[in-house]
Image: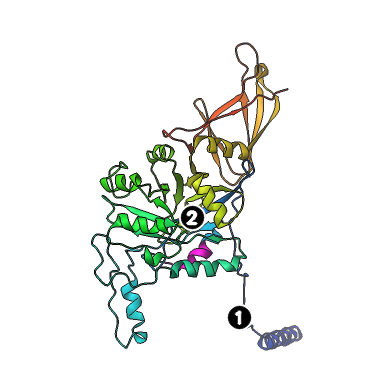
Amino acid sequence: MKRVFLILALAGLCFADAAAQKKIPETVTFTQKADRRTEIILPQVNGLNIYKADLHTHSIYSDADLTPEQRVKEAWYDGLDIFSMTDHVEYRRHEPSMLKFLKGYTGGEAKKAVNHNVIRKAANEEGIKADLNIPTKLAQSAAKAYGGAMLIIPGCEITREPKKIGHYNALFTTDNNTIYDTDPLQALRNAKKQGALITHNHPGWSRKSCDFTEFELKAYGEGLIDGVEIMNGYWFYPKTMQRCVEQNLYMLGCTDSHAQTNIFRLNGHFRTMTLVFAKELTEKAIRKALEKRMTLAYSAGNIAGDSKLLQDFFKASVSYKFLSRGKKGAAVYALTNNTSIGYKIRMGKKLFELPAFQTITVTIAKDKDGHDKNIEFHVANMWEVGYNNPKIVFKASAK
């Protein structure tokens, strides 16, 4: 028995000595960091590609929390193809803090911010000293990391008192530093002189109605407005869609992001965006698509815009085929969603979910004369002018 104890003791000393000599690493990596982009798969429609765009965002150079470089990276992660850095011309909340931080570069004392908040009053004779082109330049530089797959549209936001005047994005600008004027109408004119397209942003924000104000009647009357942001973040302004049709204006969906856009993912859907129907991913082609009103707005799983474009988009996204005969000869069809966007289909009083990249079956009874009927339904998460859901008709193909 003593011999057994002695053997066990010697074995324990050997194990202890081996453990003491084992080299413990300085650093252990459990996972490898990799950039992951959400790919939003959409169809071609009538020979046109569909590009995902956010044409209204902000950075630390106005009143948001992220840099332009972070905004571009965020847009890439979110699956976008087109992005615009539209910092405020008249409101630059971080400017005083930036100047304090840089006081060592400005003569040893902090310079006072000049006209960094002129939303409700005119800028004084000093005007605006900040370089308003910097955010776009930084975004364009950051986009080079993605090999030309991310198009940056130059822009800025003309920002005035919201209830009577409103906010307007100038897109395709050439020099943001020459846009400001004490008269907001003249500021819009200055942007148009550069060849910019002007979007009327969030027309119902901070108001009880989307009806025209006196200022808006002048701006629209002069032909200064090219489009309307019918969706902003989680806000939808359905009454403005009729205006877009009547005045031949494009419709946009934008985040107007100030904080991080991961809030959209956390809520289970893509970020608010515009679906742009264009031949190629170039500034010229995208501008042409906007001018031709070839856009749909997306927010929180909903899509809004021109009725025909909605129908064409849906029919390019969802395919159908006959499967079998059910009771009394009813035709059973499979509806397959070939895209990343889910749909809600309403047939009479029944509401069906058609998730992304999934198939459901629907049963269509014969008519009173015993003939096969077409597949007819409304898409409950699509919105056309009049706040209606578009009607989709698939021709009967039962055998």
At x 46% / y 63%, what residue is drawn?
Answer: 174
- Mark 2–mark 1 Cα distance, whole angstroms, equals 41 Å
- Quarter of the image where one finds residue 181: bottom left
Residue 311 horizontal/vertical position (percent): 55, 35
Identify which amino acid the numbered label 1 is placed on: Thr
At x 36% / y 62%, what residue is drawn?
Answer: 179
Residue 178 horizontal/vertical position (percent): 37, 65
Q: How many numbered marks have been drawn onto this rendered protein structure?
A: 2
**In the rendered image, which residue does mark 2 sit on?**
54
Disc nearest the viewer among 2 and 1: 2
Residue 291 on the magenta span: no
The dominant secondary structure in magenta is: helix
Secondary structure at badge 1 equals loop
- Quarter of the image where one finds residue 360: top right
Specify whether 35 is left or right of 256. right
**In the rendered image, which residue does mark 1 sit on?**
27
At x 41% / y 33%, what residue is drawn?
Answer: 386
Over which residues does the magenta segment extend? 66-74
Identify which amino acid the numbered label 2 is placed on: Asp
Residue 315 horizontal/vertical position (percent): 61, 36
- Quarter of the image where one finds residue 112: bottom left
At x 33% / y 78%, what residue is drawn?
Answer: 99
Q: How would you rate the neighbour count of disc 1 (Cα within 10 Å): few for under 14, some for 14-19, many for 20 or more?
A: few
- Vertical position of residue 192 compared to residue 374: above or below: below
